Image (cartoon, grey):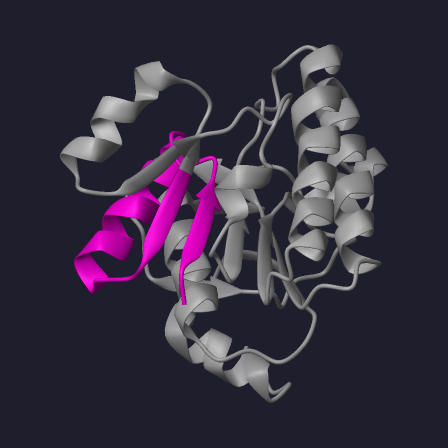
Amino acid sequence: MKTLIIGANGQIGKKLVSECIDLGLDIRVMIRDESQMSYFTRLGVDAVVGDLEGDISHAFNSCEQVVFSAGSGSKSCPKKTLLVDLWGSIRAVEESEKQGIKHFIMVSSLKSCDPLRGPQPIRHYLVARNRADDRLINSTLNYTLLRPGRLLDTEGTGKITSNFDWNDIKNTNSTITRDDVVSTILAAIITPHRTNRTLDFIQGDVVIEDFMNDLLIGEVAV
């Protein structure tokens, strides 16, 4: 099954592409402009240019699965957040519906389900993610919605959890490494899935592969 990775040039995207190559997965990457092309062609990856503020329909051709990990960044101006994190996500979902994509994996943010829980400076970003998540949830697509905690650049642990108390969780302890987010996305790509799963997760004590396998039958071991 060919997987389109949107946001492949980001920190998570590049790590994900590398892991997919190592596993021999069939992928295509969508990049914003030609200046990013050489990095992926050197890797031997099928790459197409598609700006989330412009035409993207061609990128989906012959793909059956989509990973959306693009984002303007939580520190971006509200205008860019609206165009990329909100409207870009929604356009990707709608294009996937048109083209009959079999599985859509969205990388969102832990507090997008309740933006007022987030820090004041990024609440506009969380609102954008909330609306994009809602469009996916109400789409006709089979989806996996991943909502990781605050991202860290430290080495991955290979373990996560969704067993936490929302009333206790603070920005300082709602964290996860980028490496472990990548591993979770990868597990969603390669693990057979049931329809429509949403995962709020942070660093934990359950091996990611076991976690995702248990999630299939609704018995997450936490």
Q: Is residue 98 left or right of residue 149?
A: right
Horizontally, residue 131 falls left or right of residue 27, namely right
Query: Which sits in the foreground, 212 or 45?
Result: 45
Q: Position of residue 222 (x, y in %)?
A: 55, 77
How many numbered callouts?
Answer: 0
Left or right, 59 with reference to 19: right
Q: Image point 30% across, 46% down: which residue?
A: 17
Residue placed most toward the observer, 120 or 60: 60
Indicate whether residue 206 is drawn in magenta. no
198 shown above or below 149? below
Residue at screen point 57% across, 23% down? 73
- Name the quadrant containing residue 49: top left
Q: Residue furthest left?
A: 42
Q: Is residue 220 visible?
A: no
Name the residue: 62% across, 80% down: 194
Confirm whether the magenta stretch covers residue 15.
yes
Q: Can residue 75 be seen in this view?
A: yes
Question: Residue 104 location in percent, x, y?
Answer: 60, 58
Q: Which of 149 and 7 is in front in this view?
A: 7
User: Which x, y percent locates residue 81?
Assistant: 70, 21
| Quadrant in the picture for residue 123 | top right
Quadrant for the N terminus, please: bottom left
* Residue drawn where x is 65% and y is 42% of the image: 92
The magenta region covers 1-29
**Could you tell me residue 71's position as x and y percent?**
57, 29
